[in-house]
Image (cartoon, rainbow, N blue to C red):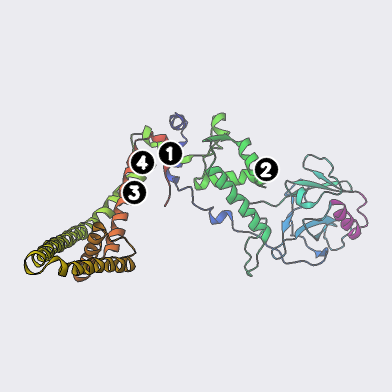
Amino acid sequence: MIAARLMRRGVMPAVTARVTSSTMPLPRSMLMPLASFSSISRSTVGTTNSFGAGSGSAGKPLELKYLEANGSLALALPLTGDPHSEIGLGMKLFSLHPTTSVASFVSQVQLEDTTAKDVQIRTQKGVPVAPETAFSSLMADDFQIVLNDKVLRVAAPVFTGDAYTSLPQDGGLDMRAIAHKAAIIKLRETIANHPKWKIDVTEFKKLAADHGIPPKQASQVLHAFHQVGLVFHFSQAADEELKSAVFLKPRNILDGYFDSLGLIPPSTQRYVEKRQQLEADLAAIMPEHDALLHLQAQLDETAHKRTAVYCYLSSAGLVGTGGLYAWLTFVEYSWDIMEPITYFTGFGVSVLSYFWWTLTTSEYEYGNVYDFIYQRRRNALYTKSQFDPIKLDNLQAKVAGIHRDIADITTKLTKPTCLQAEFLKEK
């Protein structure tokens, strides 16, 4: 098992203290800018000996940075024709848009420094860049600027570092920085839904590139993801296979590791705690649920009994009416006298049937009559007893939902330990 391999290599003890949810955001230290620049309207704004921090030769490379307000780029170049430098090598600050082409930038440099006869832009490996290439494509990685006989290294903006300001202090908004953050969020969602549980670093960088994150920044994003527990990547491991692996399901790894130590895995503990919480919720609402259910049963039974009494009385009335008509016909009067009475009695019943249909929009049948009387009796009892059937329905639905959740958790706990995290859903 992978957990056993990680234990033997001494990796897991270093990360168990950093168990965290996969929905935790990136730490603030990964997002806080260290430098910012004012908006610059002209291509050349003056001289400075600090902007860019270095000549770009053997020491620290020059830095291509974003401006805070308008998303433009800023780059300081050492121009030999600058008389303000103590050593004859001053720094000229250039402002350009990401859509600026290489040819346009070269023209700006030669316009500012007439001694710059040979100005070229090359890739990090020294391959010349096409003149029509825009800086938005060029700054995907570090590159070189050749000024006459000097080769200056330029560091491209860093995604998660200090090369741009996401939310400047003046309340402005750098939309490019927000787009970069959106790419990282989208990458995190892709990783969370990835079918594999492990990939190599090369495949991770390819995923990052598919989301618009350059290879240079992909390594920093991977490190940040490891720090917050979104993935596991042991870059300092002695084993080459482990060093090149990116574990996309850190919960599965931790569950297997804890299980191998004879401890309760984190996912199992989450399930147990969730089931205990559901059982506590169920115990809290069951007394009220049972009381309302018992009251409803009593009221319904009383309504049925009263409706049955009405039916018995109606039956007795029909039998009595038949006996009365027979006595009037054969004893007191004759059929000649009773015939019109029986006719109008039948016609009256027909009128009452039509009135019933008009009132209830149902056929005049014994079952419908019984239900009508029962509903009226029951509603009267509900009102008199202040019983709320809607409240009982809601409680019954809640109890049924809790029972389903408990049964679902019980089923998930029967899954292998290394797979339980796959079924763990945040609510």
Q: Residue at x 42, y 36 (%)?
A: 419
Which element carries disc 1, helix, strand or loop? helix
Q: Mark 4 or mark 2, which is nearer the start of the sequence?
A: 2
Residue 159 versus residue 379 in the image, above or below: above
Say which quarter of the image contains residue 287. Answer: bottom left
Is 113 part of what is drawn in magenta? yes
Q: Mark 1 or mark 3, which is nearer the start of the sequence?
A: 1
Q: Mark 2 or mark 1, which is nearer the start of the sequence?
A: 2
Name the residue that disc number 3 marks: 274
Amino acid tagged 3: Lys
Name the residue that disc number 4 marks: 268
Q: Main secondary structure of the magenta part?
A: helix
Any mark on residue 215, and which? 2
Would you say 369 lies left or right of 153 here? left
Q: In the rendered picture of this protein, how many numbered marks are placed on residues?
A: 4
Quadrant of image for the N terminus:
top left
Q: Mark 4 or mark 1, which is nearer the start of the sequence?
A: 1
Residue 335 lies, in percent from the top left, at: 14, 65
